[in-house]
Image (cartoon, grey):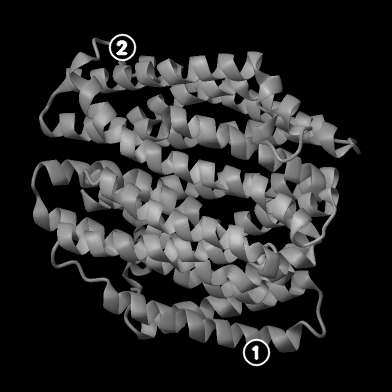
Amino acid sequence: MKNNIYRSAAQVTAFSTVEKGLSFVYRIILTRIIGAEGIGIYQICLTVFSVFLTVASSGIPVTVSRLMAKSNAKNDISGKHAAVTAGVICTLAVTVPIALILFFGRNAFGFLFSDVRCVQIFVILLPGLVITSIYAVIRGSFWGNKQFLPYSIIELVEDAIMVFAGIALIWGVTDPVIGARNATFAVLISYTFSFIASLFWYFKKGGKFVNPKKQLKPLLSSATPITAMRTATSLLNSAVSVLMPALLISACGYTSSEALAIYGVAMGMAVPLLFAPSALIGSIAVVVAPELSENYYRKRENAVRYDVEKTVKAATFIATVLIPILFVLGNALSVLLFDNEFCGELVRNCSFIVLPLCISLITNTILNSMNCEKLTLLNFCIGAVAMITSVLFLTRYLGVYAYALGLGLSQIICATLNLRLLRKKCAGIAYIKYTVRSIMVAVAACLFGWLLNGIISHYLAPIWQLLICMPLILGFTFGALYCLEMVSSRPFKKLFAKGKKKQSKA
């Protein structure tokens, strides 16, 4: 059973890595063609859109997956179909009215954007609100049925379609507004593909829509707090997209274009680099959540404890490996990818955020799988207060770093409260010693990399800094983790042994 989990996690991670790599390359191309101002407009539209998409469906896929895991524990096949049907009905009941209101009343909703040029671009995404929310429910059914391969393929192809369509539509464009508009069309095209492909696969594998009555109440009860938390996240990001440029103009003296460009660098360049681990965390969460839910409802306490402990340690390990890379090579990465030194400064100075971010993301998933949605919502709200307070009161003194400080505080608060709750829900889990050692390794690797790159950067271009320093920093980090017995060479020995067996058979 555990081998299946690891195999599925590796599979989802591999597909997700390729997918995020495509998106990252696309982000670089977008930045270089439509510029920081165009990225700022594009990012604002997507941020506001994500608020409505979150309201409509963010909590439903996770809940559908959990209800299907619960039905699996009871061998209730009809309950699985009812959960999917209830999810589709609920999401349509929200998205269709919202899309119609926003389309016909678009001139009245200019206050949602810090730049009026965003309104007409945002309207392009409205059909995607309906079809993507349905796809989100079907995606949850894939998770619940542990059909990770079709889910991974659809996600990868969706992203590839967005990238290729986007490049075709923005190529040769010089106006940032037209570039942002064309890039938005590419997003809608990719949404349409995933909607059609997911429904085809769902019905092909025996999925059906049935009477949802018995699953409506548990779905709404569980999905509402998750949706509320993710809606609050989107609202928070949307508020920042309005407040930050406005505060940079009024409190820091920047022009509108300068403020949009700074916001574009922070949210469109630096934040994606800092949030890179979320792709790996998401892959782990997708695979572990259904299994964890099923074990929880079957009351397999030892299995639950094992899954929780290993998952938290995996998130900590990912952060430990990536923090030194971002701290030491953030500037080289940013110059090479975006030709922007300010982005590099932001990434370097904010790399510490990665550890609490990883822990916060994975513990939210774990606790939601254990029916603790309301408590994770409360923990998030406490962290969100720190975020918005920092932006409102410190932008005058720190500029865009007020957002970075608020983000760090919110993730630290959320991660700490979630871990405290996990210790109550799952007594006996051991992660503190591992986390402390991980922090020590990350600090030592940062120091090693800083000294090494301090010498190399005087003589070599960014690309050579990356090619030389990154393997050495990774080698130092893995070596330290191995010496502290925090990683094992056993998986590699097994892989090597399998390779030798295949060669001997041949």
Residue 406 lies in what quarter of the image? bottom right
Query: Nearer the N terminus, badge 2 or badge 1?
Result: 2
Q: Where residue 184 sits in the image (x, y, percent)? A: 70, 30
Image position of 135 with respect to 460: above or below: above
Taking the spot 31% from the left edge, 76% from the top edge, the residue there is 434
At label 1, counting other C-alpha atoms closer than 10 Å, the crowd grade (few under 14, some 14-19, many 20 or more) is few
Image position of 13 with respect to 358: above or below: above
**Considering the numbered disc 2 on the image, is that residue within a helix, a strand or a loop?**
loop
Q: Where residue 446 sits in the image (x, y, percent)? A: 56, 82
Q: Amino acid at mark 1?
A: Leu
Residue that carries the numbered disc 1 in the rendered image? 451
Could you give the CA–CA distance between mark 2 and mark 1, rounded to whole angstroms? 61 Å
Q: Are marks 2 and 1 in contact (CB under 8 Å)?
A: no
Taking the spot 43% from the left edge, 45% from the top edge, the residue there is 12
Image position of 361 with respect to 205: above or below: below
In the picture, measured across the screen, residue 410 lies left or right of residue 366, that is right
Residue that carries the numbered disc 2 in the rendered image? 209
Viewer-proximal residue among 410 and 301: 410
Image position of 378 with respect to 82: above or below: below
Q: Is residue 10 visible?
A: no
Q: Amino acid at mark 2?
A: Phe
Residue 298 lies in what quarter of the image? top left
Residue 200 lies in what quarter of the image? top left
At label 2, counting other C-alpha atoms closer than 10 Å, the crowd grade (few under 14, some 14-19, many 20 or more) is some
Taking the spot 53% from the left edge, 55% from the top edge, the residue there is 388
Viewer-proximal residue among 117 and 69: 117
Taking the spot 71% from the left edge, 87% from the top edge, the residue there is 454
Q: Where residue 304 sits in the image (x, y, percent)? A: 17, 54
**Considering the numbered disc 1 on the image, is that residue within a helix, a strand or a loop?**
helix
Q: Is residue 476 visible?
A: yes
In the picture, measured across the screen, residue 361 lies left or right of residue 84, that is right
